[in-house]
Image (cartoon, rainbow, N blue to C red):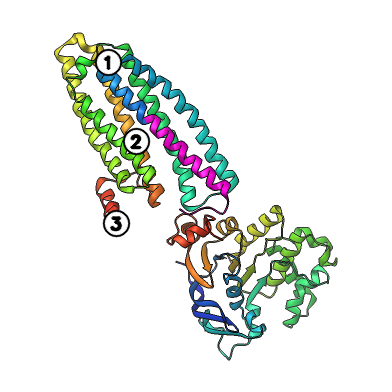
Amino acid sequence: MGEHLLKQFDDEMNKLRFRLVRVGTLLQQQIELAISSLLDNNYERANLVIELEKKIDQLDIKIDKQCARIIALHQPVAQDLRLILAGFQINIYMEMMSDLATNITKRVLEMPDIQSIVAQTNINKMAKRLEEMISDILDGFVNMNVELAIKAVKASEDIDSIFDDNFKLINSIMIDDHSLIKFCANLQDINRNFQIIAKQGKSIAQELVFLFEAKVVKHFNIEDLNEIEKQEL
Amino acid sequence: MKKTKISVENLNLFYGKNQALHDIIIQIPENQVTAFIGPSGCGKSTFLRSINRMNDLIDNVKIDGKVIIDDIDIYDKNIDVVQLRKRIGMVFQKSNPFPKSIYENVAYGPRVNGINEKKILDEIVEESLKKAAIWDESKDRLKNSALSLSGGQQQRLCIARSLAVNPDILLMDEPASALDPISTSKIEELIHELKENYTIVIVTHNMQQAARVSDTTAFFYLGKLIEFDKTRKIFTNPTLKQTEDYITGRFG
Protein backbone atom coordinates (compact mmCIF):
# COMPACT_ATOMS: atom_id res chain seq x y z
CA MET A 1 0.00 0.00 0.00
CA GLY A 2 1.11 3.55 -0.65
CA GLU A 3 1.97 6.12 1.97
CA HIS A 4 -0.81 7.45 4.18
CA LEU A 5 -1.47 11.18 4.22
CA LEU A 6 -0.86 11.08 7.96
CA LYS A 7 2.66 9.90 8.72
CA GLN A 8 1.65 9.14 12.30
CA PHE A 9 -0.86 6.58 11.02
CA ASP A 10 1.73 4.90 8.79
CA ASP A 11 4.12 4.77 11.75
CA GLU A 12 1.50 3.13 13.97
CA MET A 13 0.55 0.56 11.34
CA ASN A 14 4.19 -0.26 10.57
CA LYS A 15 4.91 -0.66 14.26
CA LEU A 16 1.96 -3.02 14.58
CA ARG A 17 3.17 -5.11 11.63
CA PHE A 18 6.65 -5.18 13.10
CA ARG A 19 5.41 -6.26 16.54
CA LEU A 20 3.28 -9.04 15.04
CA VAL A 21 6.30 -10.30 13.08
CA ARG A 22 8.45 -9.99 16.21
CA VAL A 23 6.07 -12.16 18.23
CA GLY A 24 5.85 -14.54 15.28
CA THR A 25 9.62 -15.00 15.14
CA LEU A 26 9.88 -15.37 18.93
CA LEU A 27 7.14 -17.98 18.79
CA GLN A 28 8.87 -19.79 15.94
CA GLN A 29 12.05 -19.88 17.99
CA GLN A 30 10.13 -21.00 21.08
CA ILE A 31 8.42 -23.87 19.27
CA GLU A 32 11.71 -25.01 17.71
CA LEU A 33 13.37 -24.97 21.13
CA ALA A 34 10.45 -26.87 22.68
CA ILE A 35 10.77 -29.50 19.96
CA SER A 36 14.53 -29.85 20.29
CA SER A 37 14.32 -29.96 24.09
CA LEU A 38 11.91 -32.86 23.67
CA LEU A 39 13.86 -34.70 21.00
CA ASP A 40 17.38 -34.05 22.34
CA ASN A 41 16.68 -33.95 26.07
CA ASN A 42 18.18 -30.46 26.36
CA TYR A 43 17.30 -28.67 29.65
CA GLU A 44 19.01 -25.45 28.72
CA ARG A 45 16.73 -25.06 25.73
CA ALA A 46 13.73 -25.97 27.83
CA ASN A 47 14.48 -23.05 30.16
CA LEU A 48 14.84 -20.72 27.17
CA VAL A 49 11.33 -21.69 26.10
CA ILE A 50 10.00 -20.44 29.41
CA GLU A 51 11.97 -17.19 29.07
CA LEU A 52 10.58 -16.60 25.59
CA GLU A 53 7.03 -17.03 26.83
CA LYS A 54 7.54 -14.04 29.15
CA LYS A 55 8.71 -11.86 26.25
CA ILE A 56 5.71 -12.91 24.14
CA ASP A 57 3.34 -12.12 27.00
CA GLN A 58 4.74 -8.58 27.23
CA LEU A 59 4.35 -7.98 23.51
CA ASP A 60 0.84 -9.47 23.61
CA ILE A 61 -0.32 -6.64 25.86
CA LYS A 62 1.45 -3.99 23.76
CA ILE A 63 -0.20 -5.25 20.56
CA ASP A 64 -3.64 -5.27 22.21
CA LYS A 65 -3.23 -1.69 23.36
CA GLN A 66 -1.87 -0.58 20.02
CA CYS A 67 -4.79 -2.08 18.06
CA ALA A 68 -7.27 -0.35 20.39
CA ARG A 69 -5.37 2.94 20.08
CA ILE A 70 -5.37 2.86 16.26
CA ILE A 71 -9.12 2.20 16.18
CA ALA A 72 -9.85 4.99 18.66
CA LEU A 73 -7.62 7.59 17.03
CA HIS A 74 -7.79 6.79 13.33
CA GLN A 75 -10.99 4.78 12.65
CA PRO A 76 -9.29 2.65 9.97
CA VAL A 77 -11.27 1.11 7.11
CA ALA A 78 -10.83 -1.57 4.44
CA GLN A 79 -7.38 -3.21 4.43
CA ASP A 80 -6.19 -1.12 7.38
CA LEU A 81 -9.19 -2.25 9.42
CA ARG A 82 -8.59 -5.86 8.40
CA LEU A 83 -5.02 -5.64 9.69
CA ILE A 84 -6.30 -4.43 13.07
CA LEU A 85 -9.05 -7.07 13.27
CA ALA A 86 -6.72 -9.85 12.11
CA GLY A 87 -3.94 -8.46 14.32
CA PHE A 88 -6.14 -8.73 17.42
CA GLN A 89 -6.95 -12.35 16.62
CA ILE A 90 -3.45 -13.39 15.51
CA ASN A 91 -2.04 -11.92 18.71
CA ILE A 92 -4.44 -14.01 20.81
CA TYR A 93 -3.62 -17.20 18.90
CA MET A 94 0.15 -16.61 19.12
CA GLU A 95 -0.03 -16.07 22.86
CA MET A 96 -1.97 -19.33 23.28
CA MET A 97 0.53 -21.19 21.07
CA SER A 98 3.33 -19.85 23.24
CA ASP A 99 1.59 -21.20 26.37
CA LEU A 100 1.25 -24.61 24.73
CA ALA A 101 4.94 -24.68 23.75
CA THR A 102 5.75 -23.93 27.36
CA ASN A 103 3.44 -26.76 28.50
CA ILE A 104 5.37 -29.17 26.26
CA THR A 105 8.64 -28.07 27.79
CA LYS A 106 7.32 -28.44 31.32
CA ARG A 107 6.39 -32.03 30.54
CA VAL A 108 9.90 -32.60 29.18
CA LEU A 109 11.42 -31.22 32.39
CA GLU A 110 9.19 -33.50 34.48
CA MET A 111 10.11 -36.60 32.45
CA PRO A 112 13.84 -36.56 31.65
CA ASP A 113 13.85 -40.03 30.06
CA ILE A 114 10.89 -39.51 27.76
CA GLN A 115 13.07 -39.46 24.60
CA SER A 116 13.33 -43.22 24.19
CA ILE A 117 9.57 -43.50 23.99
CA VAL A 118 9.29 -40.46 21.72
CA ALA A 119 11.55 -42.28 19.29
CA GLN A 120 8.92 -45.04 18.95
CA THR A 121 6.28 -42.55 17.76
CA ASN A 122 5.75 -40.10 14.90
CA ILE A 123 6.18 -37.07 17.19
CA ASN A 124 9.33 -36.17 15.28
CA LYS A 125 7.44 -36.16 11.97
CA MET A 126 4.66 -34.08 13.52
CA ALA A 127 7.13 -31.55 14.91
CA LYS A 128 8.85 -31.17 11.54
CA ARG A 129 5.50 -30.57 9.81
CA LEU A 130 4.58 -28.01 12.47
CA GLU A 131 7.87 -26.14 11.98
CA GLU A 132 7.20 -25.92 8.23
CA MET A 133 3.71 -24.66 8.90
CA ILE A 134 4.89 -21.90 11.25
CA SER A 135 7.52 -20.86 8.73
CA ASP A 136 4.88 -20.63 5.97
CA ILE A 137 2.65 -18.51 8.19
CA LEU A 138 5.47 -16.07 8.94
CA ASP A 139 6.62 -15.85 5.32
CA GLY A 140 2.99 -15.54 4.23
CA PHE A 141 2.42 -12.57 6.57
CA VAL A 142 5.65 -10.75 5.70
CA ASN A 143 5.24 -11.22 1.94
CA MET A 144 1.43 -10.91 1.94
CA ASN A 145 1.31 -14.27 0.18
CA VAL A 146 -2.11 -15.89 0.28
CA GLU A 147 -0.84 -19.16 -1.23
CA LEU A 148 1.47 -19.72 1.74
CA ALA A 149 -1.42 -18.95 4.10
CA ILE A 150 -3.61 -21.52 2.37
CA LYS A 151 -0.72 -24.03 2.44
CA ALA A 152 -0.53 -23.53 6.21
CA VAL A 153 -4.27 -24.10 6.61
CA LYS A 154 -3.93 -27.38 4.71
CA ALA A 155 -0.87 -28.42 6.79
CA SER A 156 -3.07 -28.49 9.86
CA GLU A 157 -5.03 -31.39 8.29
CA ASP A 158 -1.79 -33.39 7.91
CA ILE A 159 -0.84 -32.70 11.50
CA ASP A 160 -4.28 -33.85 12.62
CA SER A 161 -3.78 -37.16 10.92
CA ILE A 162 -0.27 -37.60 12.42
CA PHE A 163 -1.82 -36.83 15.82
CA ASP A 164 -4.30 -39.68 15.34
CA ASP A 165 -1.49 -42.08 14.41
CA ASN A 166 0.53 -40.99 17.44
CA PHE A 167 -2.46 -41.36 19.72
CA LYS A 168 -2.86 -45.00 18.68
CA LEU A 169 0.88 -45.69 18.83
CA ILE A 170 1.26 -44.28 22.34
CA ASN A 171 -1.81 -46.25 23.50
CA SER A 172 -0.34 -49.49 22.19
CA ILE A 173 3.00 -48.76 23.94
CA MET A 174 1.06 -48.35 27.20
CA ILE A 175 -0.86 -51.57 26.63
CA ASP A 176 2.33 -53.48 25.89
CA ASP A 177 4.23 -52.22 28.92
CA HIS A 178 2.22 -50.97 31.89
CA SER A 179 5.32 -49.55 33.54
CA LEU A 180 5.35 -46.86 30.84
CA ILE A 181 1.86 -45.56 31.58
CA LYS A 182 3.13 -42.44 33.35
CA PHE A 183 5.52 -41.57 30.51
CA CYS A 184 2.93 -42.30 27.87
CA ALA A 185 0.28 -40.19 29.59
CA ASN A 186 2.71 -37.27 29.43
CA LEU A 187 3.46 -38.03 25.83
CA GLN A 188 -0.24 -38.07 24.96
CA ASP A 189 -0.41 -34.64 26.50
CA ILE A 190 2.53 -33.44 24.39
CA ASN A 191 0.95 -34.98 21.30
CA ARG A 192 -2.28 -33.12 22.05
CA ASN A 193 -0.41 -29.85 22.67
CA PHE A 194 1.28 -30.09 19.26
CA GLN A 195 -2.07 -30.71 17.64
CA ILE A 196 -3.64 -27.67 19.33
CA ILE A 197 -0.66 -25.49 18.35
CA ALA A 198 -1.29 -26.54 14.76
CA LYS A 199 -4.99 -25.70 15.11
CA GLN A 200 -4.14 -22.22 16.42
CA GLY A 201 -1.67 -21.88 13.53
CA LYS A 202 -4.48 -22.81 11.16
CA SER A 203 -6.62 -20.04 12.68
CA ILE A 204 -3.79 -17.54 12.11
CA ALA A 205 -3.43 -18.68 8.51
CA GLN A 206 -7.20 -18.22 8.05
CA GLU A 207 -6.89 -14.69 9.44
CA LEU A 208 -4.16 -14.03 6.85
CA VAL A 209 -6.51 -15.06 4.04
CA PHE A 210 -9.06 -12.61 5.50
CA LEU A 211 -6.40 -9.92 5.71
CA PHE A 212 -5.18 -10.32 2.12
CA GLU A 213 -8.38 -11.32 0.34
CA ALA A 214 -11.20 -9.98 2.56
CA LYS A 215 -12.62 -13.53 2.58
CA VAL A 216 -13.68 -15.30 5.75
CA VAL A 217 -12.50 -18.92 5.36
CA LYS A 218 -12.98 -20.06 8.97
CA HIS A 219 -15.21 -23.03 8.18
CA PHE A 220 -14.03 -23.74 4.67
CA ASN A 221 -13.11 -27.24 3.55
CA ILE A 222 -10.10 -28.08 1.39
CA GLU A 223 -12.12 -27.87 -1.87
CA ASP A 224 -13.26 -24.32 -1.05
CA LEU A 225 -9.65 -23.35 -0.32
CA ASN A 226 -8.51 -24.87 -3.60
CA GLU A 227 -11.06 -22.65 -5.32
CA ILE A 228 -9.56 -19.52 -3.73
CA GLU A 229 -6.08 -20.65 -4.78
CA LYS A 230 -7.30 -21.10 -8.36
CA GLN A 231 -8.75 -17.57 -8.39
CA GLU A 232 -5.36 -16.30 -7.23
CA LEU A 233 -3.49 -17.97 -10.07
CA MET B 1 -32.83 -5.05 -4.57
CA LYS B 2 -34.44 -1.64 -4.11
CA LYS B 3 -36.25 0.04 -6.99
CA THR B 4 -34.24 2.70 -8.83
CA LYS B 5 -35.43 6.23 -8.11
CA ILE B 6 -32.87 8.23 -10.07
CA SER B 7 -31.26 6.78 -13.14
CA VAL B 8 -28.44 8.75 -14.73
CA GLU B 9 -27.30 7.87 -18.22
CA ASN B 10 -24.07 9.18 -19.74
CA LEU B 11 -24.23 12.56 -18.06
CA ASN B 12 -21.56 15.04 -19.16
CA LEU B 13 -21.34 18.56 -17.80
CA PHE B 14 -19.17 21.41 -19.06
CA TYR B 15 -18.40 24.76 -17.47
CA GLY B 16 -17.52 26.56 -20.68
CA LYS B 17 -14.73 24.47 -22.16
CA ASN B 18 -13.94 22.63 -18.95
CA GLN B 19 -15.60 19.28 -18.55
CA ALA B 20 -16.59 18.82 -14.91
CA LEU B 21 -18.49 15.53 -15.21
CA HIS B 22 -17.55 12.67 -17.51
CA ASP B 23 -20.07 10.11 -18.67
CA ILE B 24 -21.72 9.50 -15.33
CA ILE B 25 -23.86 6.37 -15.21
CA ILE B 26 -25.55 5.53 -11.92
CA GLN B 27 -28.78 4.10 -10.54
CA ILE B 28 -29.72 5.61 -7.20
CA PRO B 29 -32.09 3.37 -5.23
CA GLU B 30 -35.40 4.54 -3.81
CA ASN B 31 -35.83 5.08 -0.06
CA GLN B 32 -32.14 4.63 0.60
CA VAL B 33 -29.37 7.00 1.53
CA THR B 34 -26.71 7.36 -1.14
CA ALA B 35 -23.47 9.13 -0.24
CA PHE B 36 -21.21 10.89 -2.73
CA ILE B 37 -17.59 10.99 -1.60
CA GLY B 38 -14.39 12.19 -3.20
CA PRO B 39 -11.75 14.90 -2.85
CA SER B 40 -12.59 18.59 -3.35
CA GLY B 41 -13.22 19.42 -6.97
CA CYS B 42 -14.08 15.86 -7.96
CA GLY B 43 -17.54 16.85 -9.20
CA LYS B 44 -19.71 15.36 -6.47
CA SER B 45 -21.51 18.64 -5.62
CA THR B 46 -21.83 19.52 -9.30
CA PHE B 47 -23.42 16.15 -9.88
CA LEU B 48 -25.74 16.59 -6.90
CA ARG B 49 -26.89 19.91 -8.32
CA SER B 50 -27.56 18.23 -11.67
CA ILE B 51 -30.24 16.11 -10.02
CA ASN B 52 -32.54 19.12 -9.44
CA ARG B 53 -31.23 21.19 -12.36
CA MET B 54 -29.67 23.80 -10.13
CA ASN B 55 -26.78 24.02 -12.58
CA ASP B 56 -29.26 25.60 -15.01
CA LEU B 57 -28.82 28.78 -12.98
CA ILE B 58 -25.12 28.99 -13.80
CA ASP B 59 -24.05 30.74 -17.00
CA ASN B 60 -22.07 28.83 -19.55
CA VAL B 61 -23.06 25.36 -18.29
CA LYS B 62 -23.74 22.74 -20.91
CA ILE B 63 -25.17 19.37 -19.99
CA ASP B 64 -25.80 16.27 -22.07
CA GLY B 65 -27.04 12.86 -21.09
CA LYS B 66 -30.12 11.87 -19.13
CA VAL B 67 -31.25 12.14 -15.52
CA ILE B 68 -34.37 10.02 -15.24
CA ILE B 69 -36.49 10.32 -12.11
CA ASP B 70 -39.45 7.93 -11.97
CA ASP B 71 -39.23 7.30 -15.72
CA ILE B 72 -39.16 11.00 -16.66
CA ASP B 73 -36.03 12.65 -18.05
CA ILE B 74 -35.70 15.87 -16.06
CA TYR B 75 -33.64 17.47 -18.84
CA ASP B 76 -36.50 17.03 -21.31
CA LYS B 77 -37.42 20.43 -22.79
CA ASN B 78 -41.04 20.08 -21.64
CA ILE B 79 -40.14 19.75 -17.97
CA ASP B 80 -41.37 22.51 -15.63
CA VAL B 81 -38.26 23.12 -13.49
CA VAL B 82 -40.23 24.79 -10.68
CA GLN B 83 -42.48 21.75 -10.40
CA LEU B 84 -39.43 19.49 -10.53
CA ARG B 85 -37.73 21.29 -7.64
CA LYS B 86 -40.88 20.92 -5.53
CA ARG B 87 -40.29 17.19 -5.67
CA ILE B 88 -36.63 17.51 -4.80
CA GLY B 89 -35.72 19.22 -1.54
CA MET B 90 -32.23 20.58 -1.06
CA VAL B 91 -30.24 21.21 2.11
CA PHE B 92 -26.95 23.11 1.94
CA GLN B 93 -23.77 23.13 3.99
CA LYS B 94 -24.65 26.43 5.60
CA SER B 95 -28.15 26.60 7.01
CA ASN B 96 -30.07 29.33 5.22
CA PRO B 97 -33.35 30.06 7.01
CA PHE B 98 -35.32 33.09 5.85
CA PRO B 99 -35.15 36.04 8.28
CA LYS B 100 -38.69 35.27 9.33
CA SER B 101 -40.36 33.33 12.12
CA ILE B 102 -39.85 29.59 12.51
CA TYR B 103 -43.47 29.08 11.47
CA GLU B 104 -43.16 31.25 8.36
CA ASN B 105 -40.02 29.46 7.24
CA VAL B 106 -41.86 26.16 7.10
CA ALA B 107 -45.16 27.58 5.83
CA TYR B 108 -43.47 29.50 3.01
CA GLY B 109 -43.31 26.65 0.50
CA PRO B 110 -46.90 25.44 0.98
CA ARG B 111 -48.11 29.06 0.71
CA VAL B 112 -46.25 29.48 -2.60
CA ASN B 113 -48.01 26.31 -3.70
CA GLY B 114 -51.36 27.96 -2.97
CA ILE B 115 -52.19 26.61 0.47
CA ASN B 116 -53.51 29.51 2.55
CA GLU B 117 -55.92 27.93 5.03
CA LYS B 118 -54.43 28.40 8.50
CA LYS B 119 -55.57 25.04 9.84
CA ILE B 120 -53.90 23.16 7.01
CA LEU B 121 -50.75 25.27 7.26
CA ASP B 122 -50.61 24.63 11.02
CA GLU B 123 -50.80 20.91 10.37
CA ILE B 124 -48.09 21.03 7.71
CA VAL B 125 -45.79 23.11 9.93
CA GLU B 126 -46.26 20.76 12.89
CA GLU B 127 -45.82 17.64 10.82
CA SER B 128 -42.72 18.97 9.02
CA LEU B 129 -41.07 20.13 12.24
CA LYS B 130 -41.82 16.73 13.79
CA LYS B 131 -40.37 14.88 10.82
CA ALA B 132 -37.25 17.04 11.06
CA ALA B 133 -36.96 16.27 14.80
CA ILE B 134 -37.16 19.90 15.87
CA TRP B 135 -40.79 20.17 16.98
CA ASP B 136 -40.12 19.70 20.69
CA GLU B 137 -37.49 22.43 20.66
CA SER B 138 -39.53 24.91 18.64
CA LYS B 139 -43.24 24.33 19.39
CA ASP B 140 -43.36 27.00 22.10
CA ARG B 141 -41.60 29.64 20.03
CA LEU B 142 -42.95 29.24 16.52
CA LYS B 143 -43.31 33.01 16.19
CA ASN B 144 -39.68 33.66 17.16
CA SER B 145 -37.18 34.45 14.48
CA ALA B 146 -35.60 31.41 12.87
CA LEU B 147 -32.27 33.18 13.30
CA SER B 148 -32.62 32.84 17.09
CA LEU B 149 -32.09 29.07 16.73
CA SER B 150 -28.68 27.42 17.10
CA GLY B 151 -26.77 26.32 13.97
CA GLY B 152 -27.86 22.70 14.36
CA GLN B 153 -31.48 23.72 14.94
CA GLN B 154 -31.40 26.04 11.93
CA GLN B 155 -30.20 23.16 9.76
CA ARG B 156 -33.03 20.93 10.99
CA LEU B 157 -35.45 23.82 10.35
CA CYS B 158 -34.16 23.97 6.76
CA ILE B 159 -34.82 20.24 6.47
CA ALA B 160 -38.36 20.83 7.83
CA ARG B 161 -38.80 23.60 5.24
CA SER B 162 -37.79 21.19 2.49
CA LEU B 163 -40.19 18.52 3.78
CA ALA B 164 -43.14 20.95 3.95
CA VAL B 165 -43.62 20.87 0.16
CA ASN B 166 -43.78 17.09 0.30
CA PRO B 167 -40.80 16.14 -1.88
CA ASP B 168 -39.79 12.57 -2.53
CA ILE B 169 -36.08 13.22 -2.92
CA LEU B 170 -33.80 15.11 -0.52
CA LEU B 171 -30.41 16.31 -1.72
CA MET B 172 -27.98 17.27 1.02
CA ASP B 173 -24.71 19.04 0.32
CA GLU B 174 -22.47 18.64 3.39
CA PRO B 175 -25.45 19.16 5.73
CA ALA B 176 -23.48 18.68 8.95
CA SER B 177 -20.01 19.95 8.13
CA ALA B 178 -20.49 23.21 10.04
CA LEU B 179 -22.10 21.60 13.09
CA ASP B 180 -20.80 20.35 16.43
CA PRO B 181 -20.77 16.56 17.08
CA ILE B 182 -24.10 16.50 18.96
CA SER B 183 -25.94 18.48 16.25
CA THR B 184 -24.25 16.28 13.66
CA SER B 185 -25.55 13.15 15.41
CA LYS B 186 -29.06 14.60 15.38
CA ILE B 187 -28.87 15.29 11.64
CA GLU B 188 -27.48 11.80 11.01
CA GLU B 189 -30.24 10.23 13.11
CA LEU B 190 -32.76 12.30 11.20
CA ILE B 191 -31.37 11.15 7.84
CA HIS B 192 -31.73 7.58 9.03
CA GLU B 193 -35.39 8.14 9.98
CA LEU B 194 -36.26 10.07 6.83
CA LYS B 195 -35.06 7.43 4.41
CA GLU B 196 -38.19 5.40 5.10
CA ASN B 197 -40.17 7.97 3.14
CA TYR B 198 -37.58 9.81 1.06
CA THR B 199 -34.75 9.02 -1.30
CA ILE B 200 -31.74 10.83 0.13
CA VAL B 201 -28.51 11.78 -1.60
CA ILE B 202 -25.80 13.27 0.58
CA VAL B 203 -22.47 14.81 -0.35
CA THR B 204 -19.99 14.55 2.48
CA HIS B 205 -16.30 15.00 3.08
CA ASN B 206 -16.58 13.11 6.32
CA MET B 207 -15.94 9.51 5.41
CA GLN B 208 -17.07 8.15 8.77
CA GLN B 209 -20.33 10.00 8.23
CA ALA B 210 -20.78 8.43 4.79
CA ALA B 211 -20.09 5.02 6.35
CA ARG B 212 -22.56 5.65 9.19
CA VAL B 213 -25.54 7.09 7.36
CA SER B 214 -25.55 5.70 3.84
CA ASP B 215 -26.67 2.44 2.27
CA THR B 216 -24.80 2.99 -0.99
CA THR B 217 -21.72 5.07 -1.71
CA ALA B 218 -20.41 6.60 -4.91
CA PHE B 219 -16.76 7.60 -5.12
CA PHE B 220 -15.94 10.41 -7.56
CA TYR B 221 -12.53 11.48 -8.76
CA LEU B 222 -11.65 14.11 -11.35
CA GLY B 223 -15.25 14.31 -12.56
CA LYS B 224 -15.63 10.58 -13.03
CA LEU B 225 -17.67 8.08 -11.07
CA ILE B 226 -14.97 5.62 -10.05
CA GLU B 227 -16.90 3.11 -7.96
CA PHE B 228 -20.50 2.76 -6.80
CA ASP B 229 -21.52 -0.02 -4.47
CA LYS B 230 -23.09 -0.87 -1.15
CA THR B 231 -21.49 1.25 1.57
CA ARG B 232 -20.48 -1.81 3.58
CA LYS B 233 -18.56 -3.09 0.54
CA ILE B 234 -16.91 0.25 -0.25
CA PHE B 235 -15.67 0.65 3.33
CA THR B 236 -14.58 -2.93 3.93
CA ASN B 237 -13.40 -4.27 0.62
CA PRO B 238 -13.67 -1.83 -2.29
CA THR B 239 -13.17 -3.31 -5.74
CA LEU B 240 -10.79 -0.68 -7.07
CA LYS B 241 -7.41 0.33 -5.68
CA GLN B 242 -8.20 4.00 -6.31
CA THR B 243 -11.21 3.77 -3.99
CA GLU B 244 -9.21 1.88 -1.36
CA ASP B 245 -6.45 4.51 -1.51
CA TYR B 246 -8.95 7.33 -1.03
CA ILE B 247 -10.99 5.84 1.82
CA THR B 248 -7.87 4.73 3.67
CA GLY B 249 -6.37 8.21 3.34
CA ARG B 250 -3.61 7.41 0.89
CA PHE B 251 -4.26 10.21 -1.54
CA GLY B 252 -6.15 13.46 -1.38
Q: Nearer the viewer, residue B118 or A179?
A: A179
Magenta part mainly helix, strand or loop? helix
**The residue stretch that appears in magenta:** A1-27
Q: Nearer the viewer, residue A147 or A223?
A: A147
Q: Which chain hosts label 3?
A: A
Q: Which mark is residue A41?
A: 1
Q: Position of residue B50 (x, y in %)?
A: 59, 78
> Tag 2: residue type?
Gly
Q: Position of residue A16 (x, y in %)?
A: 49, 40
Measured in 3D between alpha carbons, the distance from the residue under mark 2 to the one under mark 1, in whole angstroms, is: 25 Å
Q: Are marks 1 and 3 on the same chain?
A: yes
Measured in 3D between alpha carbons, the distance from the residue under mark 1 to the one under mark 3, in whole angstroms, is: 46 Å
> Tag 3: residue type?
Gln
Q: Return the disc, 2 or 3, that comes first in the chain's sequence.
A: 2
Q: Is residue A45 magenta?
A: no
Quadrant in the rendering for residue B198: bottom right
Q: Nearer the viewer, mark 1 or mark 3?
A: 1
Q: Position of residue A73 (x, y in %)?
A: 60, 45
Q: Return the disc, 1 or 3, that comes first in the chain's sequence.
A: 1
The residue lying furthest to the left in this view is A176
Residue corresponding to mark 3: A231
Q: Residue at x 64, y 68 (%)?
A: B173
